[in-house]
Image (cartoon, rainbow, N blue to C red):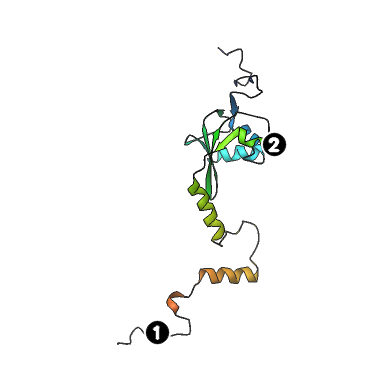
Amino acid sequence: MKNKSDNKNGQTAPTEKGTATTARLDKWLWASRIFKTRSIAADACKNGRVTIDSANAKPSRPLKVGEVVSVKKPPITYSFRVLKCIEQRVGAKLVPEIYENVTDPRQYELLEMSRISGFVDRARGTGRPTKKERRALDDFTDPILFGFDDEDEFDFDESF
């Protein structure tokens, strides 16, 4: 039997502060500004890029206070501890009241390493590289090994 405080979707009614004790995962991801749109948040859940306490989660899964939500946004995985369950989008200044960022510092090091590596995968659909970009890619992928140039000939049959 349903509780009188439950609404027609089976979620708990808002408390006196205006926040519910549970919220849909996709709505919470959108409302807490982790994803730009709710449909992008739902797609991330469907594709297995969002986990709750290391278990894949569906977009409609109810989210509770204290749970840890992990979001894979390559090249790193962000982790957030839920402080409030909300379904209405809030301003950027209020985000620290909604979740606590518990992402491992090594993940940020990985992000920084990928930024300074200089080699970025080309986005699909951006077309062919320009001549300058192609030359830079060729220089990066074909380093001169061991100080030998193409002009230098080395005879392996020659005995010392």
- CA–CA distance between discs 2 and 1? 67 Å
Q: Residue at x 51, y 52 (%)?
A: 109
User: Foreground mark, 2 or 1?
Assistant: 2
Q: Quadrant of the C terminus?
A: bottom left
Where is residue 22 shown, x and y percent of the image?
58, 25
In-image side of 38 versus 100 (left or right): right
* Residue corresponding to mark 2: 91
Q: Secondary structure at mark 2?
A: loop
Q: Position of residue 142 (x, y in %)?
A: 50, 72
| N-terminal label among 2 and 1 | 2
- Amino acid carrying label 2: it is Gly
Quadrant of the image for the N terminus?
top right
Question: Front-most of 147 and 10?
Answer: 147
Q: Where is residue 107 drawn, in percent x and y?
A: 50, 48
How many residues crowd mark 1 within 10 Å: few (<14), some (14–19), many (20+)? few
Left or right: 47 with respect to 40?
left
> Label 2 neighbourhood size at 10 Å, few (<14), some (14-19), many (20+)?
few
| Rendered image: mark on residue 154 | 1
